[in-house]
Image (tube, rainbow, N blue to C red):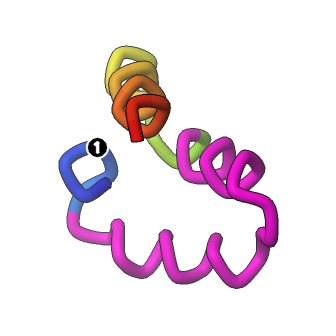
Amino acid sequence: MSQFIGPLAKMIVEKEVARHTALETLVQALAAEIDRPADRASFLAVVKKL
C-alpha cells in the first residue's frame, strides 16, 4: 500500500480499517486515496490477486 500512497499509508489504512467492516468497501476506500489513476488500477489489480 505504501508504494501507492506514500509515507502516510499506515495511518490511512488504520483509519479506513476502523471505518469499514466489509473487505470490498475497505479496498475501494483505500483505492480512493490513490491520486494517480494508473497507480489506483495497479493497487486494485494487486488486491484482486490476493
Query: Residue 33, relative to residue 7: is it above or below?
Result: above
Q: Position of residue 26 (x, y in %)?
A: 67, 57
Residue drawn where x is 28% and y is 43% of the image: 4
The vertical placement of 6 against 39, above or below, is below
* Residue at 52% from the left image edge and 82% from the top image edge: 14
Residue type of the residue flagged with mark 1? Phe
Direction from residue 39 to residue 18 in the image, left or right = right
Question: At x 67% / y 42%, what residue is drawn?
Answer: 28
Q: Which corner quadrant of the image does residue 42 belong to?
A: top left
Q: Would you name the residue on which mark 1 appears?
A: 4
In the image: residue 25, left or right of residue 2: right
Find numbered disc 1 in the image and state the secondary structure of the residue it sits on.
Answer: helix
Magenta segment includes 24? yes
In the rendered image, residue 20, in percent from the top left (x then y), is placed at: 78, 69
Q: Residues within 10 Å of mark 1 (few under 14, many from 20)?
A: some
User: What segment carries the magenta color?
Assistant: 7-31
Q: Quadrant of the C terminus?
A: top left
Is the magenta region chiefly helix, strand or loop?
helix
- Assess whether residue 23 is covered by the magenta stretch: yes
Residue 40 percent coordinates (x, y): 44, 28
Query: Is 47 left, or right, of 17 in this rendering?
Result: left
Q: Nearer the viewer, residue 14 or 8?
A: 14
Q: Quadrant of residue 22?
A: bottom right
Residue 41 position in % (x across, y down): 43, 20
> Is residue 2 placed above or below 10 in the rendered structure?
above
Figure disc tally: 1
Q: Quadrant of the N terminus?
A: bottom left
Measured along the vertical axis of the image, is residue 28 above or below residue 7?
above
